[in-house]
Amino acid sequence: MLMSMGRRNTERLYVNRIARFAAMDADGDAVITLAEFMAKAQASYEAADTNDDANVTVWEFRSQQSPF
């Protein structure tokens, strides 16, 4: 049986998605280009690579709060 998350949790998820979208939309035109998406991915990758070895382990990846 699938349980409802509740209105408050649903609203929180919606707000979080809007905030993540806005953070990726660097020029504020309400569209995320491939360049904007890749810039966020690059920044997340660099932040996850905590030992600067140009590789991200599962443990480094899991330590990220929200990689994308």
Image (spheres, helix red, strand yellow):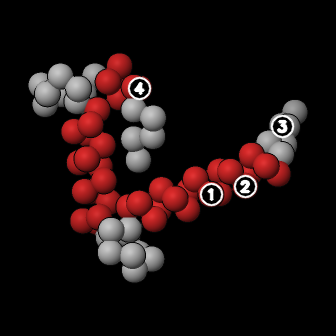
Cα separation between marks 4 and 2 = 25 Å
Question: SS of the residue at dot 4?
Answer: helix
Check contact, mark 1 vs mark 2: CB within 8 A: yes
Amino acid at the residue labelled 4: Arg
Which of the numbered marks, if any, corresponds to residue 62?
Answer: 4
Which of the numbered marks, if any, corresponds to residue 15?
Answer: 1
Cα separation between marks 4 and 3 = 27 Å
Quadrant in the picture for residue 33: bottom left
Position of 19 with respect to 64 (left or right) is right
First along the sequence among labels 1 and 4: 1
Q: Please tell me which residue is depicted at 62% across the width and 57% down the height of the picture.
A: 15
Amino acid at the residue labelled 3: Leu
First along the sequence among labels 1 and 3: 3
Which of the numbered marks, if any, corresponds to residue 7?
Answer: none
Q: Please tell me which residue is depicted at 73% across the width and 55% down the height of the picture.
A: 11
Residue 68: x and y in percent read 41, 47
Amino acid at the residue labelled 1: Val
Nearest to viewer (mark 3 / mark 2)? 2
Nearest to viewer (mark 4 / mark 3)? 4
Check contact, mark 3 vs mark 2: CB within 8 A: no
Cα separation between marks 1 and 2 = 6 Å
Q: Is residue 24 above or below residue 28?
A: above
First along the sequence among labels 4 and 3: 3
Question: SS of the residue at dot 3?
Answer: loop
Cα separation between marks 1 and 3 = 23 Å
Check contact, mark 4 vs mark 3: CB within 8 A: no
Which of the numbered marks, if any, corresponds to residue 2?
Answer: 3
Residue 17: x and y in percent read 56, 56
Which of the numbered marks, if any, corresponds to residue 11?
Answer: 2
Cα separation between marks 3 and 2 = 18 Å
Cα separation between marks 1 and 4 = 23 Å
Residue 24: x and y in percent read 38, 61
